Image (cartoon, rainbow, N blue to C red):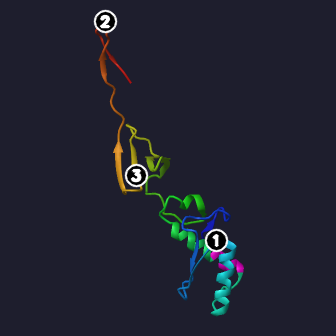
Amino acid sequence: MATLKYPNRVPPGGWFYVQPDTGFSQRHGTLVGLVLIIVEHRKANNLEGADYKSVRADIENQICERLRGKRSLWTFCEGLKIKEPPPGGGYAMLPVSGVRAVQAVAPSPVPRVTAFSADTGTTSTTAPAPAKKRSCPTCGRRKSST
């Protein structure tokens, strides 16, 4: 079950919970206030788990599930089950100003970087540019530059 890393920080979308059994939805300014409202709702409707601990766990889990697939998930939640890396190795995720660069962990003869844009859902692969040959302005010999 997922939990919030920092329960005093307001998650994206605020403190919001929908009771699955009844469809009752509630928004509140604090986590504690939201928990108390849902406890009272569960008691009034004779629903299971009408105690503070189980309601808080359900709220935290629902908030983290709502954030699944969003960048802020890793900032606010922990304890989520994530997919296993593909066979043959994993990937290193590097946050780069709104774009995540993914580089294969396995060594390759030419280092390549694959970038994934969360906004557009597209990937692009780049390879380093080959060294250009230039002529020396003094003697005219060709030099390799990096």
**Mark seen at residue 116:** 3
Q: Is residue 42 above or below residue 107?
A: below
75 magenta-colored: no
Q: CA distance from mark 3 to mark 1?
A: 35 Å
Instruction: Point out the stretch of residues depicted in magenta.
Output: 52-57
| Residue at x-position 62% and y-position 64% | 10
Q: Amino acid at mark 2?
A: Cys
Residue 11: image location, x then y, percent: 59, 64
CA neighbours of label 1 inside 10 A, class few (<14), some (14 to 19), many (20+): few
Question: Which of 13 and 133 lies nearest the eye of the viewer?
Answer: 13
Label 3: state its secondary structure: strand
Is residue 133 shown left or right of residue 99?
left
Label 1: state its secondary structure: loop
Whether pointer 2 and pointer 1 mark residues with C-beta atoms closer than 8 Å, the reply is no
Q: Amino acid at mark 3?
A: Phe
Q: CA distance from mark 3 to mark 2?
A: 46 Å
* Quarter of the figure with residue 133: top left
Residue 124: image location, x then y, percent: 34, 48
| Residue at x-position 56% and y-position 85% | 24
* Quarter of the figure with residue 122: bottom left
Residue 58: image location, x then y, percent: 61, 77
**Residue position marked by numbered label 1 in the rendering:** 29
Is residue 28 shown left or right of residue 142?
right
Which mark sits nearer the N-terminus, 2 or 1? Answer: 1
Residue 75: image location, x then y, percent: 58, 58
**Residue position marked by numbered label 2 in the rendering:** 139
Question: Which of 72 and 15 lies nearest the eye of the viewer?
Answer: 15
Q: Amino acid at mark 1?
A: Gly
Question: Which of 51 and 90 lies nearest the eye of the viewer?
Answer: 51
Q: Is residue 65 above or below residue 100?
A: below
